[in-house]
């Protein structure tokens, strides 16, 4: 039977599909994370188990792609606004997560295990490195934009880089690479890798997405970028997972989290490549090593204790430094003590250049098994608890907004649906009017939040949102919903936001942008009044999207110049995508809005807004008679 499975490709395929299908079902029944189940399945079918499979090249290649997939997902799913706000904390945590395990590794390896300084330093680098193996658990619970996760994911890139630099320096020293040209060549390769991935890849992706919308092409382009970045990192002397993560970061803007392309990436990766990677990890683990030698067990125990203590200390100090709660600390710890790709790279190279002996190699394999298991349980528990807390908070804060998405003179239902999905508008209806007169009539007859949308390019290729905010807009009922729609859209497509507004409105917007958990990176331009709205045309570039926040008649921020918006957009912004946002009004247009708005203004602005609405209402009634 064993020989049949090894030699028949269809039998190998059937076995793998069966494992991927059955393991999650069994794990759910016994309340064990699927990650642990796949690793145990790999141990069972591998050369150190029932010997049903050997580590074939195909399985190794697909497993490697699974690890790259995990790092790509981590980079793509970073919330760019939250990451921008937390980048200092991410850098601090990355240094903590490297330095503490490294120092502990030096101490335990030198004075407990009795290794020399070179071996101790490389072991310290191995303890510092970690793999985001349990990131799919975080993503499954919808916690990928949680602050602690952003800090860990951002710090991971720094931690892996520092660990691999230690490996490169020790390798160069032992191979007698004392020639300065070696280091110049190494630095040149790393620089070329960074330039290609951070400059050339985004340029190619943007150009391709503008001209081609075929789903298969877009997916294969991302796959090509992933493999290319991994190969370049490997060529530059770094680890391929670092290239995959950097690729995800630079492509973050072009693959919104709620887009069909991201759903396709997650589905194929989580259904196939990630399980194959975990099965491959299990296949290299030899359980018999546990009772083969006390030396192996001793080394493995010291390794496991050192790594757990180092990563826990980093998470504990990070909790104190960044004001996190205990469950967030637990999530950081769960994400950072799992180890696979980085550890395998370091221990394999260390063994090949005779820094590590066979006992260290076997101890590292046992460490991978135990730490992956512990990490899965810790991450699962923390992510679930935080998801429950987040759900309770969202339920308490949720406003059941109803949105009307409208197009004028064109049928763009797919684009309206894409806008609704990326902006996370749960209750949306769609309409299309032939003329602006019909659109204005519809807007005046409804009290819901309305978005008039015109699309000239896909949302993922937009670089900036240029937002015109009229005077007193912040005093409109439910203006916060319009702001939230802009913030969510900016976060999904990675576009910077530029607000054009007066001084008073700017201060209100600054406060809204700095809210905890609702951070928005934005810049501001002075626009004294709506008469200056055309100043946007001077700054608008080809890939900018124009956003106008308007208002209905007889409201606090209404300006008669709003009637000219269709002409302004047609004459000056016809080549740009644009949106016009109308905040929701409590009640129906006319006197109901006038009365309900009185409770949303205060101080001197309340008097001004109240008188202004009375005059505008009277004028409107006279005009309609």
Image (tube, rainbow, N blue to C red):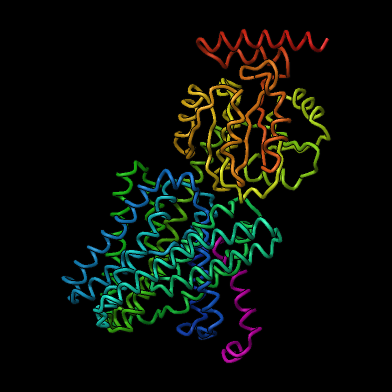
In the image, what residue occupies the spot 44% across and 46% down?
84
Residue 171 as seen in the image, left or right of residue 44: left
Where, by quadrant of the figure, is residue 220 drawn? bottom right
In the image, what residue occupies the spot 32% across and 57% down?
97
Image location of residue 470, percent across then percent down:
59, 24
Residue 446 as seen in the image, left or right of residue 260: right
Image location of residue 156, percent across then percent down:
39, 59
Image location of residue 492, percent across then percent down:
57, 47
Image location of residue 316, percent across then percent down:
30, 50
Total marks shown come to: 0
What residue range appears in magenta? 1-29
> Against 274, is 9 above or below?
below
Where, by quadrant of the figure, is residue 177 drawn? bottom left
In the image, what residue occupies the spot 81% across and 27% down?
437
Quadrant of the rendering where the C terminus is positioned:
top right
Residue 584 visible from this viewpoint: yes
Q: Is residue 15 magenta?
A: yes
Where, by quadrant of the figure, is residue 391 drawn? top right
> Against 81, is 117 above or below?
below
Q: Is residue 180 magenta?
A: no
In the image, what residue occupies the spot 67% across and 8% down?
614
Residue 20 as seen in the image, left or right of residue 363: right
> Against 205, is 149 above or below?
above
Foreground: 393 or 460?
Answer: 460
């Amino acid at each position: 039977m064993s020989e049949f499975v090894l030699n028949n490709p269809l039998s190998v395929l059937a076995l793998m599909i069966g494992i991927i299908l059955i393991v999650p079902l069994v794990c759910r029944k016994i309340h064990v994370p699927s990650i642990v189940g796949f690793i145990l399945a790999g141990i069972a079918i591998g050369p150190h188990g029932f010997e049903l499979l050997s580590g074939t090249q195909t399985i190794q290649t697909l497993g490697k792609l699974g690890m790259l997939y995990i790092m790509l997902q981590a980079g793509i799913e970073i919330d760019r606004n939250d990451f921008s706000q937390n980048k200092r904390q991410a850098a601090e945590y990355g240094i903590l997560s490297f330095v503490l395990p490294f120092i502990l590794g030096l101490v335990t390896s030198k004075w407990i295990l009795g290794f020399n300084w070179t071996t101790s330093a490389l072991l310290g680098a191995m303890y510092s490195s970690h793999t985001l193996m349990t990131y799919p658990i975080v993503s499954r619970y919808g916690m990928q934009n949680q602050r602690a996760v952003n800090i860990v994911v951002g710090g991971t890139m720094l931690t892996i880089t520092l660990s691999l630099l230690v490996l490169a320096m020790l390798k160069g020293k032992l191979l007698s690479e004392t020639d300065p040209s070696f280091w110049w060549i190494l630095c040149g390769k790393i620089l070329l890798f960074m330039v290609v991935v951070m400059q050339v890849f985004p340029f190619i992706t943007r150009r391709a997405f503008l001209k081609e919308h075929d789903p298969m092409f877009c997916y294969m382009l991302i796959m090509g970028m992933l493999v290319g970045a991994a190969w370049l990192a490997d060529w530059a002397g770094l680890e391929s997972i670092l290239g995959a993560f950097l690729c995800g970061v630079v492509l973050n803007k072009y693959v919104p989290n709620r887009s069909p392309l991201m759903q396709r990436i997650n589905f194929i990766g989580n259904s196939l490549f990630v399980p194959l990677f975990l099965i491959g990890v299990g296949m290299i683990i030899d359980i018999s090593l546990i009772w083969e030698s006390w030396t192996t067990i001793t080394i493995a125990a010291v390794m496991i204790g050192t790594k757990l203590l180092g990563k826990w200390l980093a998470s504990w100090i990070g909790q104190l430094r960044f004001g996190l709660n205990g469950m967030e600390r637990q999530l950081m710890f769960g994400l950072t003590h799992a180890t696979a790709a980085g550890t395998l790279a370091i221990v394999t190279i260390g063994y090949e250049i005779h820094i590590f002996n066979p006992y260290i190699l076997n101890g590292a394999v046992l460490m991978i098994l135990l730490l992956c298991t512990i990490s899965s349980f810790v991450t699962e528990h923390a992510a679930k608890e935080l998801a429950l807390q987040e759900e309770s908070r969202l339920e308490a804060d949720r406003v059941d907004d109803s949105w009307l998405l409208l197009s004028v003179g064109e049928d763009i239902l797919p684009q309206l649906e894409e806008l609704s999905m990326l902006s996370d508008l749960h209750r949306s209806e769609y309409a299309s009017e032939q003329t602006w007169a019909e659109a204005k009539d519809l807007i005046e007859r409804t009290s819901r939040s309305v978005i008039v949308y015109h699309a000239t390019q896909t949302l993922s290729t937009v670089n900036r949102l240029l937002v015109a905010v009229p005077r007193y807009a912040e005093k409109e009922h439910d203006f916060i919903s319009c702001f939230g729609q802009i913030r969510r859209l900016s976060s999904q497509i990675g576009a910077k936001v530029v607000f054009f507004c007066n001084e008073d409105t700017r201060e209100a917007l600054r406060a809204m942008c700095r809210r905890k958990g609702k951070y928005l990176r934005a810049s501001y331009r002075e626009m004294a009044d709506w008469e200056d709205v055309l100043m946007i045309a001077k700054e608008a570039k080809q890939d900018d999207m124009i956003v106008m926040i308007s208002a209905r008649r007889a409201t606090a921020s209404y300006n008669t110049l709003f009637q000219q918006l269709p002409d302004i957009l047609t004459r000056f912004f016809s080549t740009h995508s644009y949106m016009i946002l109308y905040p929701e009004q409590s009640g129906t247009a006319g006197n109901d809005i006038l009365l309900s708005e009185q409770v949303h203004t205060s101080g001197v602005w309340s008097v001004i807004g109240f008188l202004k609405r009375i005059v505008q209402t009277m004028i409107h009634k006279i005009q309609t008679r």
